[in-house]
Image: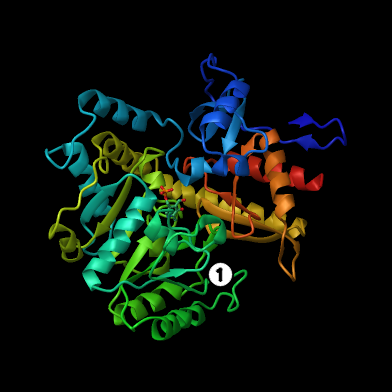
Amino acid sequence: TEPDKNDGVSIPSLPPFDYCPPPYTGPSAADILSKRKEYLSPSMFYFYNKRPVNMAGGRMQYLFDENGRRYLDAFGGIATVSCGHCHPDVVDAIVSQTKRLQHSTILYLNNAISDFAEALANKLPGNLKVVFFTNSGTEANELAMMIARLYTGCHDIISLRNAYHGNAAGTMGATAQSIWKFNVIQSGVHHAVNPDPYRGVFGSEGEKYAKDVQDLIQFGTSGNIAGFISEAIQGVGGIIELAPGYLPSVYSTIKKAGGLCIADEVQVGFARTGSHFWGFENQGVVPDIVTMAKGIGNGIPLGAVVTTPEIAEVLTRRSYFNTFGGNPVCTAAGLAVLKVIEKEKLQENAHAVGSHLKERLTALKDKYDLIGDVRGRGLMLGVELVTDHKLKTPAKLETLHIMDKLKEIGVLVGKGGFYGNVFRITPPLCFTKEDADFLVDAMDYTMAKM
Ligand code: PLP
């Protein structure tokens, strides 16, 4: 640690790391920014970046700017980098497949594609073993919703208020926060009360929220529905773990109404919760359709929908195909990710380091009134900031301020939730106890100075 000149408090310093990136020789951050302003859509970039940094490289849980300065990536890309930036095994798999064959469509056989499909199916419970590959989470959820509609012959889908499932026509319907929605046709989705233990009207009583789904089906639909889609822990929504008992009860209601249950595992799946490989397993349910993306390719564009042979049959009656979905370079990355998770015991690490981190964050909550809630599981944790505990007034500006200060110290966290007042902590699963301590020390240091 180095002493802070202002008040003698020590600025926490990053844990040691045995890697230095090669010297950066590319254009300056200012040059890149001016091109970005002229040629790229502004969108989210400015939302996240008061002072944009040129990240010139990455290695495991760290990113390096153009000056070689190291940052702890506690957001993990956007929960996309599961094994670590440029993990050597994933890089090797990508490079060797790229040299062998870069593209293989449905026209040819290719082992990189079928091996990953087999490995995915082996990771899933029940009869979930038919895989459709896509390029993103949005595409995966679009397809899942279409499959549910085709299979049931119904159109109505139930999603949750506060959900994020993508941004194309169908998935934007399932997404449920005004900032992510545009005024385009998004038909057939009904949003149920969010089973949010912190802000929800029924607290942690999952069964009570589940009753709302029954009401929604009875009063808002014909009584028959295509399905229900949800995450087990909402990511973009602000790391909200659905109230206990909610999913088993809702799944049984949905089945009675003839619908299919879709688990969106785009953020929560692939070992992130530590306790289980899949998020839905934390509530003891087995979905009819599982969608995934983000971490499955360690940042490579790859998504998938997995369902049962009986349900999958609806897509074989006519031609369904996706030019790049299941590109062998991406599936080679996916297979390498699964092997790394196993070899490096990343699920166990997510559990151990996540539990330690949550404990320390909870202790921080006792120290600072600004922290209203600490929640989540494994390495999918949220810290919600409020200016008033009773009213739960969102501390939006404070969240932005702390994020910015953390970046100065060398820690990157995400933010989310409807009010943008929740820190999202979803680092690569190789995050260490020392990284966790550094993150908490940096938050502590920043909050102490406010
Ligand atoms: N589902 C969830 C839970 C997500 O968090 C996201 C993206 O943040 C998506 C779907 C959409 O994925 P993509 O951005 O890859 O289209």
State the residue lying farthest toward the front: 184
Q: Position of residue 139 (x, y in %)?
A: 34, 51
Please indicate whether residue 272 sits to the left or right of residue 69 in the image.
Answer: left
The front one of 436 and 303 is: 303
Q: Position of residue 226 (x, y in %)?
A: 30, 72
What residue would you read off at disc 1? 196
Location of residue 346 by image quarter: top left
Q: Position of residue 201 (x, y in %)?
A: 60, 77
Up/down of 446 relative to 205, above or below: above
Q: Position of residue 79 (x, y in %)?
A: 48, 46
The front one of 445 and 42 is: 42
Which quadrant is the N terminus positioned in?
top right
Q: What residue is drawn where x is 56% and y is 49%?
A: 425
Up/down of 340 relative to 258, above or below: above
**Could one spot residue 186 in this view of the protein?**
yes
Q: What residue is drawn where x is 37% and y is 37%?
A: 300
How are the residues colored? rainbow
Please indicate whether residue 99 sits to the left or right of residue 215 in the image.
Answer: left
Location of residue 306 by image quarter: bottom left
**Could one spot residue 270 in this view of the protein?**
no
State the residue lying farthest toward the right: 7
